[in-house]
Image (spheres, rainbow, N blue to C red):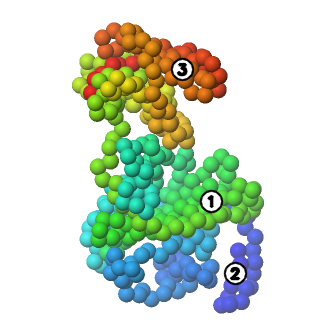
Amino acid sequence: MDVYQSQDQIASLECDPSSLVTQSSALYDELDGLALCWTDGLDRWAECPEAEPEPEVGSALGKPALPSADNSPTPGALVQPQTPNQQSAGPLGTGNDTLNTVTETRWTFYGTPSCGIGGEVTDYQRFLPTEYYNVITGNENHADDMRVEYFRVDEARRRFEASYTTWVAMAPAYPWTIAEYVGVLQADGSMELSTVIRQVDFDTVNDLVPRYDTTREEETLWPCDNLPEASAGSDGATRVLVQVPYGLDPDAYDSCDAVFGAAFEGLDVPIMTIFEQVDGTWYAENFHTAHCEENSPNICPFIGGEWTQNPREVSSNPIVLENTIDGCTNSYEFILDGRAGVANSSSHGDCALGGEPFTYAVIDCAR
């Protein structure tokens, strides 16, 4: 820590390494209460500049300024999170309109109105006062260890600021990622978003002060309205075989989607498999489960939709399906008693993963 009196440096102090990662909200609040601001370019606290007239929202000058990563306090001096009732509304505030719009909207990842990758399964992201998460190929992806450093809303300017930090086991003493967002809502329903993401350089994680690689972006986000929910079976499917927990009663559910929802919540394995027949052709797809979200969140984004194949029908009574990929043949035999039954799965050939036979419960439902 360098100590200055006016422009003269009068001391240079080394910090106790064990105290580098601490909460400094009390000091921040005290300095903020003295009408001081962290000043870009000077790397120090100074008198806050006089407020300039605010340009109209949606004008070219209304684009939010990028948050300053290089001139912000160090990772050990991050600001404490703010709850929604601690937001700054300003003299012309309009209740919680901005807060609600920002937090209740599923926003695109990319600067396009098409909502992420488009199609039946869409990527999106959400900004919340308690967490940040994104959805990849229909699967929610939460950080294992994440903290909201601050979440502020200016209702009068239709603007929000947020900072999220995440940790991983490889860098336990320092945040793995520090993400700062500044967003301004526009009249056309979009949001102009400025982002600074700092990611730790793992070659320096054991240094006294690690190095961070910084990425800065400015983009326009759009609301993802009416996103399709993950469901069992496509339109036109005549048969849908859903992997379910043992003992699930098919008569208790009036639709394939209801069976799908119960299976999603009840399976104690990370992967749920669904087979469907459309116009005589079989398709198969994997979905992650609620168990996966709770116990293995890092792998969940790589499960849903990753395995979509067209297995061939070897037999119709009982139903036997097979598919071969890179020399590995997977076989599925369905033994049904009414709508409920079991699937016997086995593999042979050049199979890199698994290969051991296993059995799971299924329910046969029609769209």
- The quarter of the picture where residue 224 lies is bottom left
Label 2 belongs to which residue?
3
Specify the amino acid type for callout 3.
Asn
Question: In this orientation, does residue 158 appear?
Answer: yes
Q: Which mark is residue 199?
A: 1
Q: Position of residue 51 (x, y in %)?
A: 42, 86
**Tags 2 and 1 touching, CB below 8 Å:** no
* Residue ID at (34%, 31%): 232
Q: Amino acid at mark 1?
A: Gln
Q: Residue at x 71, y 62 (%)?
A: 210
Q: Name the quarter where the N terminus is drawn.
A: bottom right
Q: Callout 2 environment at 10 Å: few (<14), some (14 to 19), or many (20+)? A: few
Q: Which structural element holds mark 3?
A: strand
> Circle 2 — which element?
strand
What whole-number distance in Å separates the C-alpha atoms at marks 2 and 1?
28 Å
For discs 2 and 1, the disc positioned in front in the rendered view: 1
Q: Nearer the viewer, mark 2 or mark 3?
A: 3
Residue tagged 3: 330
Disc 3 and disc 1 in contact, CB within 8 angstroms = no
Observer-nearest residue: 21 or 159?
159
The percent coordinates of residue 194 (x first, y second) are 47, 69
Look at the picture and state if 334 lies above or below 274.
Answer: above
- Residue in view at x 75 percent, y 70 percent: 14
